[in-house]
Amino acid sequence: MATKEQAVDKLKEYGQEHVLKYFDELSADEQQSLIDEIVETDMEVLKHYDEKGAARGVFSPLKTMELNEIDADKARLKEIGINAIKEGKTAALLLAGGMGTRLGSDNPKGMYNIGITKEVFIFQRIIENLLDVVNEAGATPRLFIMTSDKNNDATIAFLKEKNYFGYPADRVNFFKQDMAPACDYNGKLYMEGKGKLATSPNGNAGWYSSMIKAGLDKIIEDEGIEWVNVFAVDNVLQRICDPAFVGATIDAGVEVGAKVVKKAAPDEKVGVICLEDGRPSIVEYYELSQEMMDAKDDKGDPAYNFGVILNYLFKVSALNRIAKEQTMLHVVEKKIPYIDESGELVKPTEPNGYKFEQLVLDLIHMLDSCLSYEVIRENEFAPIKNATGVDSVESARELCKKNGIEL
Ligand code: UTP
């Protein structure tokens, strides 16, 4: 248990003494919980609040394994993948710690029902897709699920109630990602209650370190898991532990495989896979220069033509190598609920400060080699970010229908 003295020292060090303004009004339990939170919270991030992000290096194209090349070798690649799955070398890891603010539901995003005539939950779609592989390979990959403080209990209760949609309970492991504090434009911590810092999940790159903290790396080690397929909760057509993708990544001898789709237009708003200073990287759509958009490869196709869909197969030995390195920090302007001078909770309608996030795409840049692996967009990419419009429940429903999924 941390002491008040430790908390005070830490707040002084970071110039955040205002956090104790209401301390004397709190109950003994609340006081202790605030002290613990202060001592446990990573305040180093606050030093970076006014940084605008690191300068980028020199971009160059990364060759993608395209559909025709995959099709020509599919049987062999699949066999390599199926064998790895059968031998228990491949695990699945669902990133479900996000807040899903754009969708606007209070529940975890995976609990969202996209069904029309019957219930079809996002979690259900994902697990059903993974069960296809279980049936094909005759083996059940471990399914790790990352939640956050904000949605952990609701996620676990829901999946239990639904019997994990048919996935064997003893193959599912949950862990919570770390939280990060939020601050105002002067780098001062926001409070969301008199005894509670305003915090939010620290971004999706924290998954491996949070897994280690939760002791789940022991399962990886004990079971000889060599590959972890990390994927987002919101793509309801997501293929997970896809045998041909697993096989191609192993066969290529790389440290990570990335599923990509051909861009719909040169200026489409997706992160594009490429090399940066010779290492794998992802360039955001707003960083793409006109020159990069116009560049052609040796076949005359656009040289930066493939967008990532947040489905990566990471080699465990490579993750262990980079585990102690610091991932790049993204300082993001957000609307942060906070208590004001009079102790009242304010929910701002405009951004009022910064949150700190680490993103999974930065992990890619820390690795030495990457296979960019093309998949058919209409078959594998139906993200749900918004309630309506682009990347929404509506657009995902259309794509599900096209793929013969009853809703
Ligand atoms: P998004 O970038 O879409 O963020 O996450 P989000 O929090 O879900 O949604 P918005 O931006 O608030 O609307 C992409 C994936 O990364 C996970 C999400 O759950 C989703 O699967 N994620 C995101 C985490 O696991 N932790 C985080 O801290 C952030």
Image (tube, grey):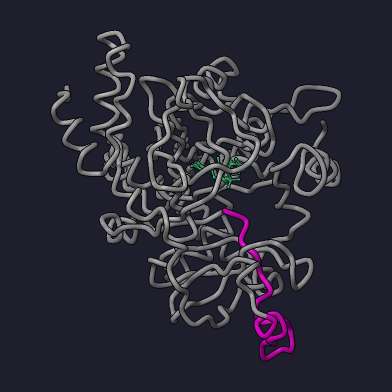
Residues shaded magenta: 290-310
The structure residue drawn at horizontal position 60% and vertical position 66%, both measured from the top left corner, is: 284
Q: Is residue 60 visible?
A: yes
From the top left corner, tell me how far across and down residue 61 is, in percent: 58, 81
From the top left corner, tell me how far across and down residue 297 is, in percent: 67, 87
In the shown orientation, is residue 273 left or right of residue 91?
Answer: right
Residue 292 is covered by the magenta coloring: yes
The structure residue drawn at horizontal position 46% and vertical position 36%, both measured from the top left corner, is: 200
Please determine whether, in this image, residue 99 is positioned above or below residue 359: above
From the top left corner, tell me how far across and down residue 213 is, in percent: 28, 38
The structure residue drawn at horizontal position 66% and vertical position 69%, both measured from the top left corner, is: 306
Considering the image in quadrants, where does the C terminus appear?
top right
Quadrant assignment, res 363: bottom left
Report the number of numbered marks. Answer: 0
Residue 272 is covered by the magenta coloring: no
Observer-nearest residue: 406 or 278? 278
**Ligand 1 sits in quadrant:** top right
Determine the residue located farthest toward the top in the rendered image: 27
From the top left corner, tell me how far across and down residue 149 is, in percent: 43, 28
The structure residue drawn at horizontal position 59% and vertical position 29%, both measured from the top left corner, is: 347
Q: Is residue 173 visible?
A: no
